[in-house]
Amino acid sequence: MSIVSRSLSDQAFEVIRERILSGEIPALAPIRQEALAEDLGISKIPLREALTRLEQSGLLRSLPNRGFFVPALSALEAEEVFALRLKLEPDAAADACLEADDAQHAAARAALAALEAVDGGDKAALATCNRGFHLLLVQSTRHQVTAQLVERLHLLADRYVHKHLEPEGRYRRADDEHQRLLDAWLARDPALVRALLAAHLQLTLDDLRLQLASTAP
């Protein structure tokens, strides 16, 4: 797959990110930069920029004499990431629903429609659209730092969301939860938004605890 774009690093970031989420690049396997650069049709400079960004996003790690690799999923990391999301995201969405305008309402409806239109077998696309929907709910002119922190947590959570969606039909349950959450957000009901989003995140974490039990230290 060759990349022809004015921003090679950005394009490489997106392609490699999707390969990580889909499992095409397996956990703990070293990233062979020369082979990957050749596959993408780019030089090693934009590739390394993309790999560094992916490391900053938590999707890659690097070690001396080993280079970049995808870290294994960790029950401990999932606990930490979702605990932080539970502390920040419900309140952020509750605050944002009070200031959202018609354009933001339309964007949130469109984001949920896009999520529901994704083929259930495309877990990487489901995770990406899921992130887009959640982030729209916390966009706020008054709490921009909070929204940026939530976005960072979502990048860290992406692989766990992908894992969470593995069981057949689970995304349909999430669709129902998302619809109720959107209805409350559009109705500008902060208490209900806070309660529904907290329950949604907690249920996801509970599922992940079972799925990742074997990876606990």
Image (cartoon, rainbow, N blue to C red):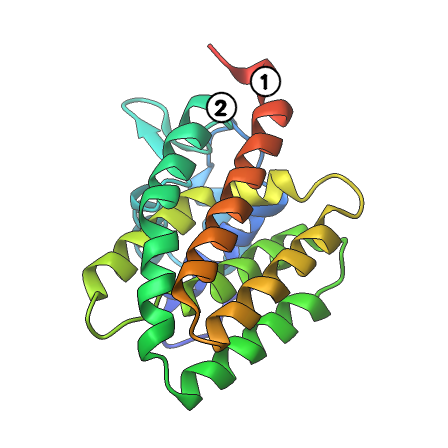
Q: Position of residue 61 (x, y in %)?
A: 36, 33
Nearest the viewer among 54 and 47 is 54
Assign the N terminus to one quadrant of the image: bottom right
How many numbered discs sit on the rendered protein? 2
The type of residue carrying mark 2 is Ala
Residue 174 seen in the current view? yes
What residue do we see at 46% from left, 47% from top?
A: 198
Instruction: Residue under label 2, please give it.
Output: 75
Q: Residues within 10 Å of mark 2 (few under 14, many from 20)?
A: many
Q: Residues within 10 Å of mark 1 (few under 14, many from 20)?
A: few
Q: Position of residue 192 (x, y in %)?
A: 47, 60
Q: CA distance from mark 1 to mark 2?
A: 7 Å
The outermost residue toward the top is 217
Q: Quadrant of residue 68?
A: top left
Q: Sequence order check: which comes first, mark 1 or mark 2?
A: 2
Residue 24 seen in the current view? no
Instruction: Residue under label 1, please give it.
Output: 213
